[in-house]
Amino acid sequence: TGNGPSLPPTGASCWICLDSDPDDDGKPLVRDCSCRGDDAGFAHLSCLSQYAETKTKEVLKKGAAADLLDTMEPWEKCPHCHQK
């Protein structure tokens, strides 16, 4: 926290798509959470956005049973270390 995203070390890969190369727009992997380890917690911003959109749609499909606060969770915190 406070120092911004960490640059990925050699061998790190996106925990969503498992690719270690930059995304389709040429943007590198980022990590801006409390995940630790040489390759833990890195992801492409484009993958994180798609992940959050998918999770939000899953919550909204529940209809009236959905807790609207759950729609914000994938946008606000890391699913691994739970840092907000």
Image: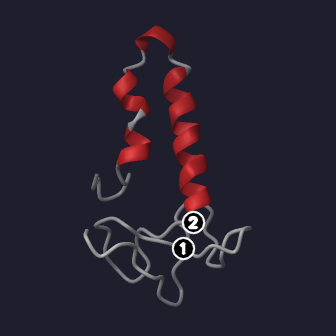
Image quarter where the N terminus lies is bottom left
- Going 38% across and 51% down the picture, which residue do you hit? 79
Q: Residues within 10 Å of mark 2 (few under 14, many from 20)?
A: many
The quarter holding residue 53 reads top right
Please give the label number shown on residue 55. none
Residue 29 badge: 1
Q: Is residue 63 above or below residue 74?
A: above
Q: Give, as a three-letter code, the residue at label 1.
A: Leu
81 vs 15, left or right, is left
Mark 1 Cα within 10 Å, few/some/many (few <14, many 20+)? Answer: many
User: Residue beneath label 2, please?
Assistant: 44
Position of residue 78 relative to residue 63, above or below, is: below
Numbered marks: total: 2
Label 1's element?
loop
Furthest-bottom residue in view?
A: 10
Q: Which is nearer the N-term, disc 2 or disc 1?
A: 1
View extreme (top): residue: 64
Location of residue 4 (image quadrant): bottom left
Q: Are marks 2 and 1 in contact (CB under 8 Å)?
A: yes
Viewer-proximal residue among 72 and 14: 72
Residue 71 image point, x, y percent: 43, 31
The amino acid on which the numbered mark 2 sits, given as a three-letter code, is His
Q: Judging from the image, what secondary structure is the residue with disc 2 in?
A: loop
Q: Looking at the picture, how far across and down is residue 38, in whole percent?
A: 39, 83
